[in-house]
Image: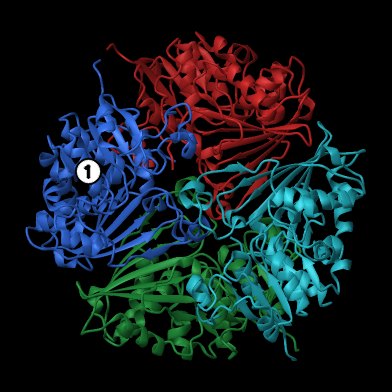
Chain colours: A cyan, B red, C blue, D green
Amino acid sequence: MGKKLGVAIVGSTGYGGVELVRLLASHPLAEVTSVISSSSAGTPITEGYPHLTGIREELLDDVDAEAIKRKADVVFLGTPAGVASKLAPQYLEAGLKVIDLSGDFRLKSPGLYEQWYKKTAADESYLEQAVFGLSELYAEKVRGASFVSNPGCYPTATTLGLAPAVREGWIDPATIIIDAKSGVSGAGRGASLGTHYSELNENFKAYKINQHQHIPEIEMILSDMAGAPVVTTFTTHLVPMTRGIMSTMYATIKGDRKASDFIDLYRSFYEGRPFVRIRPEGQVPATKEVWGSNYCDIGFAVDERTGRVTIVSVIDNLVKGAAGQAIQNLNLMMDWDETLGLQFVPVYP
Amino acid sequence: MGKKLGVAIVGSTGYGGVELVRLLASHPLAEVTSVISSSSAGTPITEGYPHLTGIREELLDDVDAEAIKRKADVVFLGTPAGVASKLAPQYLEAGLKVIDLSGDFRLKSPGLYEQWYKKTAADESYLEQAVFGLSELYAEKVRGASFVSNPGCYPTATTLGLAPAVREGWIDPATIIIDAKSGVSGAGRGASLGTHYSELNENFKAYKINQHQHIPEIEMILSDMAGAPVVTTFTTHLVPMTRGIMSTMYATIKGDRKASDFIDLYRSFYEGRPFVRIRPEGQVPATKEVWGSNYCDIGFAVDERTGRVTIVSVIDNLVKGAAGQAIQNLNLMMDWDETLGLQFVPVYP
Amino acid sequence: MGKKLGVAIVGSTGYGGVELVRLLASHPLAEVTSVISSSSAGTPITEGYPHLTGIREELLDDVDAEAIKRKADVVFLGTPAGVASKLAPQYLEAGLKVIDLSGDFRLKSPGLYEQWYKKTAADESYLEQAVFGLSELYAEKVRGASFVSNPGCYPTATTLGLAPAVREGWIDPATIIIDAKSGVSGAGRGASLGTHYSELNENFKAYKINQHQHIPEIEMILSDMAGAPVVTTFTTHLVPMTRGIMSTMYATIKGDRKASDFIDLYRSFYEGRPFVRIRPEGQVPATKEVWGSNYCDIGFAVDERTGRVTIVSVIDNLVKGAAGQAIQNLNLMMDWDETLGLQFVPVYP
Amino acid sequence: MGKKLGVAIVGSTGYGGVELVRLLASHPLAEVTSVISSSSAGTPITEGYPHLTGIREELLDDVDAEAIKRKADVVFLGTPAGVASKLAPQYLEAGLKVIDLSGDFRLKSPGLYEQWYKKTAADESYLEQAVFGLSELYAEKVRGASFVSNPGCYPTATTLGLAPAVREGWIDPATIIIDAKSGVSGAGRGASLGTHYSELNENFKAYKINQHQHIPEIEMILSDMAGAPVVTTFTTHLVPMTRGIMSTMYATIKGDRKASDFIDLYRSFYEGRPFVRIRPEGQVPATKEVWGSNYCDIGFAVDERTGRVTIVSVIDNLVKGAAGQAIQNLNLMMDWDETLGLQFVPVYP
C-alpha cells in the first residue's frame, strides 16, 4: 500500500477536531499528520483528551501555513466562527486543500453572514471559491474541488429531510415549519452557564427562536431546491444528551400523497447515496439509531385530517453534522469511494 | 383547627398516585386517609416506594367503595385508562366526590373515546356528569362539582398556551402546529422496552405522530375556545429526562401583533390565576423552571419574516399535568383557595 | 400569627443560596427578607433564576452588614471558601446571628484549614466561637448558639453513617474506607470544564483522591466519636446526575455483629432525630429516595466471609448536605421544632 | 483477499450480541454469517434494532447446531445464564469453536456455580474444557483453544486492576476492598423496574452487596495471582449512564511503594498488551475515556497517611467487558493479531 494522504486538523481541541481524529484513525487512504491548536500549541493533545492516551501522544502544532504544508496536503478547519475566514486564505495560498467546518464560508453574501453571525465576513473572492459541501445534494460540485465549506449540523439534518419534497413540489414551501432539537455537544467545549451540567440535566429548553445563524443556510439550500426564495420558521431546542439532532418538520402537502409515496420519492432521490436511510412506513428514526455514525435517517407520517406531512430526520451532529461529512467531502474531493473511513455501525445502545 | 377532609387515592402505586401522596402531605385542609392499590393491596406502600419510609408506613387498601367511604370523602383515581370508567360510578353512587386523573371521562363522545383509546367508553350518563377540570379555563364549572375529569398532561400545557390567542382570534386555528416533548415519567411505571433506561438515555425519539389519544382532547378545548371545530397537527417526543413537558406551538398571526401584544393579552387573560406565569419579552421558559411545581409558564416569539408566532409552554407533567392540577380541582370543588397545598417553589437545579 | 423572623441570604445566586430560598418559602416562623449577592447586586434574582418568576421579584441586595441588619436578624452565608471568613465577623459584630454554609469555620485549626483549603484561615477567635452544626451529633451545642458552621455535604452523609458504630467501638476505625459519590450540583454553579455537560454526561469519574478538603472535617468528627485520632481513606466520585450523595463505607467489625444488630444500634442512637431513617434488613437506600428532602437514609450489609460491614448512607447534597441542614440549625438555634419548614416528602420519581 | 472466517452469534437480540454485530462489521478476517435468536427467529433483526437498517437486513436464524455449522465455523454465545450450558456442548460436538459470553463456564466448580447463580451447572467435563479467557492474563491458554469462556464485566475491570500488585505481593490480599460501579446496559435489555428509566435517571444505587455472582470469579482470578485463596469485599452500584464500569479498589501496601512504583510495575506487567493503558502519575481514568473501545485504563493514588493504594480501573462493559474481549479471544484462538477489528478510538465526548 502506498503512502497515505497527509491531513492536518486545525482546532484539534474542539469537539469537531477531536472527532476528526477519531474517525480518520480508520481511514485507509488518509492519515492525520498534524494536530493543531493555536491556544494549546506545544502541549500534548492527551492533556485535554486523555482518551487518546497511547493513540496520539504528540504535541499540538501551531497554525502556521508553511509548517503545515511540510506535513500535510489537506487541512480541516474546526475553528470557531470568525477564525477560518482568516486562516483558510493563507492555507489555500500555500497550496493546501481546505475543508472548513465553521460557518465562515457557507453563505455567499457577506451581508447575510454579518447579519446572522455578527462578525466580519470573509473576503468575497474566497466566499465564491468555497464549494458548499452538503454531500448528498452537491456531490458533483465537491468532486475535485480544493476548497469546501462543510454544512452546519442543523442544515444537514433539515435539508436532507426536505430537499426531495421541495424539489419535486410535493409540499408548499411557504408552510414549512422546522422544530429542531440538538444534544449539547453542538455548543462546543467552551464552559458557560449554557453548557453547565446542572443547568441542562433533567431540563429541556428552546433557544435562539427565529434567530439561529443556521437559518439563512437552510433557506439558501431550500431556495435552491425550490427554484424560488423560501423563508422558514425554525426553532432550536437543547436536549439533555451529548450527541444527536432531530429535525421534526411540518408542511402542507400539494396534491394527494401518502406516506408510501414520500418513501418512494425519497428512496429514488437518494439512490446510490449510502448515508441516507429512508425508513419504512409507520417508522420514524430516533437519534440514537445513528449515534456515532455518518447516517442521516428519515421517516414520514402523513395526516389525512390536516393534509400535512410530518418528516423526521436525524443525524449525529458531530459525525454527519460535522466531522463525518467533512471526511465524506474529502473522499469526494479526492475522487475516492464516498464511504472510506466512514463505515461505522451506529453505537447502540 | 378542625378535622381535615379525608382523601383516598386509588392507584397509589402509579406515579400519579404517589405524587398525590407527596403533594397532599402539605395540604392544610385535606389529608390522605387511604392509599389504595388493587394489585398490591395488603402490602406496605414502602415496599415499592422506600422513599416513603417513616412517612407513610400503612398497608395498601383495596378498591372497595364501601370501605373507602368509611375513611374518606373524596377519591382521586390514578388508574390506567379503562379502569376509572368502571370504578368512578361505584364511588359516585357511594356518595364520594371523585377526581379522575385518567382519560376515561375527558371526551364527551363515547365514539371518539373508543376511536382514540381503543377501549370501551364509560357510560354516557357519567360522561355527561364529569366536569372537565382544566382549572384555568373551566374553574367556574369545577367549583362545587362532585365529579371532575382531570385533563391530560399534553392538553394542559398545550391549550393553556393557545387558549387566549385562539379565543381572541389572534391566530388562525387552521395553521396551528403543536410539537410537544415529554419526560419519561409520563409513560408511567410499567416496565417495557419503551421505558428501558438504556433505550432512552442519550436518545431522543418521536412517537405516536398524529395518533396520540390526547389529540381529541386538545381539539375539544381549542374548538370550545374558537367557537368552531379546530383540527390540529400534534407530534409527541420522548426526552431523556424524568419530568417535564414542553409544547412548542406555531401559528399564523391574524393582523399585526408583536410579542409584547401577546404578553399583554395573556397576562390579562390569566389575571388572578396564580399558576400561569407569562414570561417577559425575549424569554421563553425551560421545563426545569417549573420542575416539581404546579406552574405553567408561557413565552412568545414573533417572527416578522414569516408572520408566525411561536409559543412555548411548559409544565411538570406529574404536577400541573396530573396530581397538582387534581389538587387544584379539589380546592375548587371545595371552594377553598386554589393554591392550598400547592405553593411549591420549583426545584432548581 | 406574629411577625416572622427576618432572614438574609448572602450568596443568593449560588445553588446553596437559591435552595435556601426554596426551602424557606414554606417556613412557618422565618422568612427571607433580603437576598444578597455581591456580584449581582442591583439586578433581579429572576434574571439568573427565572424559576423564581412571580415568587421573588426583588433586586439582589449588597453584602453590607448595616443594611442587612435593618432587614434581618439572621444571616445565612452561601459564599465560596475564603469569603465567609471575612464577612461573618462583620455580621456577628453587627449583632446578627450567622449560619455559614462554607468550609471557613468548620476546622478549628487554622493550619489544617490552610493545608487543605489553600486559603488564609479565619481569625482564630471566630473559629473557636463557631459551633459545628452537624445537627444530629451536636444539637445540644447548636441550641441557642449565635454562630453556626454548617457541615460539608460529604461529611454529613459519611459521619452520620459511621458515628454510632465508631462511638460504640463496633468497628475498627483504622480499617474505615469511604467511597463517596456525588451529583454535579455539589460543584456549584461556576462554569468550567469540570462542570461541562458533554464532559460529565454518560461518564463516571473519580477526583481529588485522598485530597478532598472534607477529609479533615470527617476525621475531626470521627475522632470525636472514637475518642482518639482517626485517619481515613476517602475517595470522591462524580455521578452524572444533579443532586445526591452516597457514601459507601467499609470497616472491619469488632466482635460478632449482624446487620440486625447494626440496625438496632443505629435506631437507638438516632431515636428522636426525625431526619435519619434506618432501613430494614436487606435494604440499602438509593440517592433518589431522599431527593429534595432533608433525610439521611442509612442501610447495612454484613459479610460473614470477610468480617466487614458495608454501610450505605445517602443525602440530597443541597438539602441535608447544605441548605436543609442550615435551616435545621436555625430551628435549633431558635429553639424551635427541628422540622419546621423541612417536612418535604422526597420527590420521586 | 481470501474468504473470511464465518461467525455465528447466538443471542443476537441481546446487547452483547448486537455489540458483536457492530464490532465484527470492521473485522478484516472474520464476518458474521448468521445472527441467531431463539425467541425472535424468522423476524428481521432490524425490527428490534432499526439502527441496523441497510447494514444487516436478514432474518434471525434459529439455534440449531447443524444449520449453524453450514454457515459458520465459530459461534459466539450471548445468551442468559443457564442457556449456554445446554447449547455449547451441542456446538462443540458439531465441530464448531465456541466463545461463551455468559457465566456458565467461568467457574470450574459446579457447586460454586450453583451457589452463586442459583441454576444447574454445566456438565463438569465441559467446565474443564472451557478456557477462561481474560485475555491479558491467560492469553497463552486461549491461543489455539476451541472453547473459551469469556470473563464477566466486573471481573475484567477489577482483576486487570489488581493482578500485578497481587502477583508481586505488593498489597495484602486480605485488605482488598472493591467498590464497583456500572452503567445500566450491564443489566441487559430485559424490561423491569430495575432497568426503568424514571427509576434510574438522577439516581445512584447500590445492589447485590456481597452477593454478586461475579464475586467467585474475581476471587478465582485473584487467588490464582496470589497463589493462595483470596476472599474479597465487593460492592456493585448502578450509575445513571448506559455504558461503562469503574472499579475503585483499596488495599494496604506491603513495603514502601509510591504511585510511580505501581505505574512502573503495571507498565512492565502489561507490556505488549495493547488494550491496557496505565495512566501517568496524578491521573486516574474516567469511564468515558474508554467508551466504545476495548481499552482497560488503570490509574493509582497512594496515600502515605494510611498506607493504602487506591486503584481505579475502567472499561466499556459491552466492549472489553463483553463483545470486544470475546473478539480479542477469537483473535487469540485463531492466532491472529490480537487487535484485529478492535482498533476503535474511544468515542469522546
Quadrant position of the C terminus of chain D in the picture: bottom right
Please tell me whether mark 1 sits on a helix, a strand or a loop. Answer: helix
- Residue assigned mark 1: C88
Residue furthest out toward the top = B144
- Is residue B87 in view from this perspective? yes
Q: Could you say which is closer to the camera, residue C43 or residue B8?
A: C43
Residue D220 image point, x, y percent = 35, 78
Check the residue under mark 1 and report the chain it is in: C
Residue C20 image point, x, y percent = 33, 37
Residue furthest out toward the left = C227
In the displayed structure, would residue A101 be above or below residue B327?
below
Amino acid type shown at disc 1: Ala
Residue D155 image point, x, y percent = 40, 73
Q: Residue at x 43, y 32 (%)?
A: B19
In the displayed structure, would residue C30 be above or below residue A32?
above
Q: Could you say which is closer to the camera, residue B72 or residue A149?
A: A149
